[in-house]
Image (cartoon, rainbow, N blue to C red):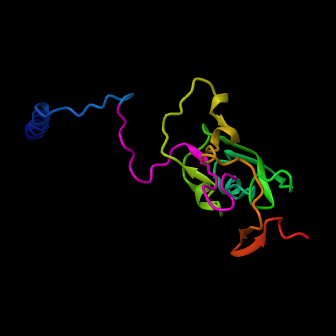
């Protein structure tokens, strides 16, 4: 028993004279480890014929893959005068309840177009429950500089299931 007490005190004295590691938090930030899963982001296409358009095609695979059912999606059809994503559909409503989420990454793995990403942001605490329900507008990253958020690509095709389909969804 005295030997264990001596080992514990030796460890304490060894660290007593070392310089403390202090981070001045609001000004300095600790870099996150690779693979950290933080706040969700809905991505957009950055370049190419779909630059500025949302990646989400409203397939609801992330909603089905979520083990705690914290994602809610409603899809609508793209029209020629209102194109939001390159596919036939887009997510008109996309909500994530961040209080319910366990940040497992299953939604990220299930997405066929890499639309949902778990970012590195860890500063999203709030004082009320309603502010932890993230709607599409809060999750969506801003469009690239000088690009509109919604537009119709000219003569482009959409990758769907390993094949290329005309951007009108393959219909006449």
At horizontal 60% and vertical 55% (from top left) the residue drawn is 46
**Where does residue 88 sit, x and y in percent of width and height?**
81, 61
Q: Is 123 situated left or right of 71 in this image?
A: left
Question: In the image as oriented, which residue stretches furthest toward the front?
Answer: 146
Image quarter of residue 158: bottom right
Residue located farthest toward the right when viewing the structure as drawn: 172
Q: Nearer the viewer, residue 11 or 169?
A: 169
Residue depicted at 8% across the width and 40% down the height: 3
- Which quadrant of the rendered structure holds the C terminus? bottom right
Q: Position of residue 153 (x, y in %)?
A: 75, 60
- Please name the residue shown 68% across and 75% down the image: 162
Majority secondary structure in the magenta region = loop
The x, y position of residue 51, in whole percent, is 66, 55
Which quadrant would residue 12 be assigned to in this image? top left
Front one among 59 and 2: 59
The picture quadrant where one finds residue 65 is bottom right
* Left or right for 94, reference 22: right
Tell me the residue at 80%/57% (across/down): 89
- Which residue is farthest top? 127
Residue farthest along the bottom direction in this orientation: 163
Q: Quadrant of the N terminus?
A: top left
Let me know if residue 106 is in the magenta part: no
Residue 87 vertical position relative to residue 93 in the rendered view, above or below: below
Total residue callouts: 0
- Residue 130: x and y, percent? 67, 29
The span picked out in magenta is: 28-53
Q: Is residue 43 magenta?
A: yes
Residue 150 vs residue 103, the one in the foreground: 150
Say if 156 sits above or below 95 in the image: below
User: In the image shown, does 21 or 163 lie closer to the viewer?
Assistant: 163
């Amino acid at each position: 028993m005295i030997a264990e007490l001596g080992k514990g005190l030796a460890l304490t004295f060894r660290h007593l004279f070392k310089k403390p590691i202090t981070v001045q938090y609001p000004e300095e930030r600790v870099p996150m480890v690779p693979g950290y899963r933080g706040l969700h982001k809905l991505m957009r296409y950055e370049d190419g014929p779909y630059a500025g358009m949302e990646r989400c095609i409203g397939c609801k695979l992330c909603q089905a893959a979520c083990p705690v059912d914290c994602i809610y999606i409603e899809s609508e059809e793209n029209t020629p005068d209102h194109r939001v994503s390159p596919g036939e559909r887009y997510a008109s409503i996309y909500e994530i309840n961040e209080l319910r989420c366990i940040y497992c990454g299953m939604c990220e793995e299930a997405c066929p177009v890499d639309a949902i990403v778990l970012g590195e942001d860890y500063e999203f605490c709030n004082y009320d429950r309603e502010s932890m329900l993230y709607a599409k507008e809060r999750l969506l990253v801003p469009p690239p500089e000088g690009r509109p958020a919604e537009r119709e690509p000219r003569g482009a095709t959409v990758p769907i299931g390993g094949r290329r389909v005309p951007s009108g969804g393959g219909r006449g």
